[in-house]
Image: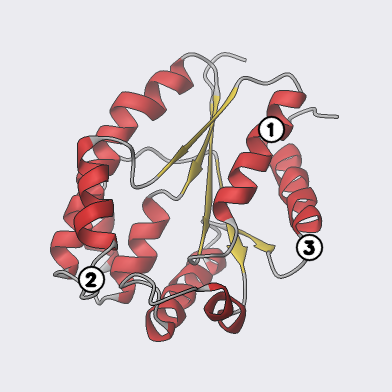
Amino acid sequence: MGRGLFICIEGLDKCGKTTHSNLLVRYLRKGGYDAVYTSEPSNGEIGRFIREYVLNRKRRICAAVEALLFAADRAEHTETFIKPNLERGRIVVSDRYVFSSLAYQGAAGMDLEWIMEINRAAIDPDLAIYIDVPIDVIMQRFRGKGSVMERREIQEKVRRIYMHLVGRGELIMVNGNRPIVETAREIRRVVSERLNLKCP
């Protein structure tokens, strides 16, 4: 296939991104493609720092620092994992990417153009999908106290930015408020049609 393909799966917390990213990888492998799963924050040192000291806090750190940390992790992740796998002809499916920074740090008041500027090391995906789930459903899926990001007001602002990106044509929206099998079927259809892939 030459250079591989880069697919991003985006959405609110608890929308089913991880489930559908993994289901898509399995579907592509079944179709004979060399597909790999990855996620953000990454498993690198910066990504582990983000998970431990940013996402698990009860109080949010400075949004600019948050954005810079995610951009640094993304730059390293892109150079050490995404690009090498694309060069090997693989299909890389990423559970979150730069759109998450636009949505989450944008919801915290950061300028979207500035976020894009600090993420210049990020490469454009061949396809980016947004799984849309109503806020009420998302809130019901949160259990316990949750992380600093798992608050209604934050999730509402995040969803508005995601919908803005859908409106600009940067993300393809898929309805995630239905049985997993139906959402997975639509994701497979979008991927097959948009990227001209032949799968069973």
Sort mark 3 into few (<14), some (14-19) or many (20+) by Cα contacts within 10 Å: few
Between the C-alphas of marks 3 and 1, the distance is 18 Å
Amino acid type, residue under disc 3 in the picture: Pro
Q: What numbered label is drawn on residue 171?
A: none
Point out residue 198 in the picture as x, y percentages from the top left corner: 79, 27
Q: Which residue is mark 3?
A: 179
Relative to 127, 88 lies left or right: left
Viewport quadrant of the N terminus? top right
Q: What numbered label is drawn on residue 26?
A: 1
Between the C-alphas of marks 1 and 2, the distance is 36 Å
User: Element under label 2?
Assistant: loop
Sequence order check, earlier mark of 2 and 3: 2
Q: Is residue 121 visible?
A: no
Q: Which residue is mark 2?
A: 110
The answer to whether the residue labelled 2 contacts the one labelled 3, judged by CB atoms less than 8 Å apart, is: no
Point out residue 115 in the picture as x, y percentages from the top left corner: 25, 59
For the residue pair 113 and 136, the one nearer the viewer reads as 136
Which residue is pictured at 57% across the width and 73% down the height? 141
Q: Is residue 133 visible?
A: yes
Which residue is pictured at 81% across the width and 57% down the height? 182
Which residue is pictured at 75% across the width and 38% down the height? 192
Sequence order check, earlier mark of 1 and 2: 1
Closer to the observer: label 1 or label 2? Answer: 1
- Quadrant of residue 48 within the rendered picture: top left
Sequence order check, earlier mark of 3 and 1: 1
Viewport quadrant of the C terminus? top right
For the residue pair 104 and 169, the one nearer the viewer reads as 104
Relative to 65, 95 lies left or right: right
Sort mark 2 into few (<14), some (14-19) or many (20+) by Cα contacts within 10 Å: some
Amino acid type, residue under disc 2 in the picture: Met
For the residue pair 119 and 159, the one nearer the viewer reads as 159
